Image (cartoon, grey):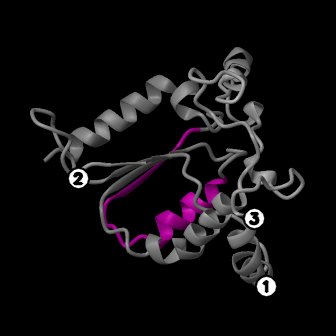
Amino acid sequence: GINAEYMGRGAPSFGGALFIAPSLEVKLPPQLVVFLGKLFVRPFFGLWIMPAFVAKASRHAPELSYRDQAEAALALLDDCERFPGVGLAWRGGMYWDVSYAFVDAFERLDGELRQLHSPFLVLHDPEDGVCKIAGTRNLMEASPSGDKTLVEVPNGLHKLDTNEHDLVIRETTAWMERHRK
């Protein structure tokens, strides 16, 4: 998301946050697994790559993100290991340490959502196969903000900024104009 109180000299500022298909819900491992992982796995194997059968969430599935297959093929080419200095995306597996950083964040998430008082806009495809909309709906329910907007974008898949570029620009620009300081 974008959170901007001040966007620089001469640029209009706005108060609030914009989220596009946020990952706000995840099924965490059982508490005992998390505890043992933090106690033994993270400190000793944090810089090791998780086995693929464990790291299901880190697999890139372009068909869930891109409507245009040519865009999906280009996304797979963006690989910092295959194209050093050019590629930006990490296509390798997830490090144990990164996975536990996500666990830490998701353990705090419900409490954080209940403290979000700022205005915000969320754009999300109800059928997003990467980041489920249930987490966004939980945000809408949990946040005490009096100024929160959810725009559902059917058939937008996960990469709304690519698949529904004009709609994303139109919705975010209109929202930012309404929240201009």
Q: Is residue 48 above or below residue 18?
A: below
Q: Nearer the viewer, mark 1 or mark 2?
A: 1
Figure quadrant of residue 163: top right
Q: Is residue 12 above or below residue 50?
A: above
Q: Are marks 1 and 3 in contact (CB under 8 Å)?
A: no
Q: Earlier in the sequence, mark 1 or mark 3?
A: 1
Residue receiving disc 1: 32
Report which quarter residue 101 is drawn in.
Answer: bottom right
* Secondary-structure class at tag 2: loop
Mark linked to residue 45 = 3
Q: Inspect the image, locate mark 3, and give the three-letter code of the amino acid beneath it.
A: Phe
Q: Which amino acid is tagged 2?
A: Gly
Residue 43 in the magenta stretch? The answer is no
Residue 15 is labelled as 2
Camera-nearest label, 1 or 3 = 3
Horizontally, residue 103 falls left or right of residue 73, namely: left
**Image-quadrant location for residue 67:** top right
Residue 124 in the figure: left or right of residue 36: left
Q: Dot 3, crowdedness within 10 Å: few (<14), some or many (≥20)?
A: some
| Magenta segment boundaries in residue numbering | 132-153
Q: Identify the residue shown where x is 69% and y is 19%.
A: 68
Percent coordinates x, y for residue 12 in the rendering: 15, 37
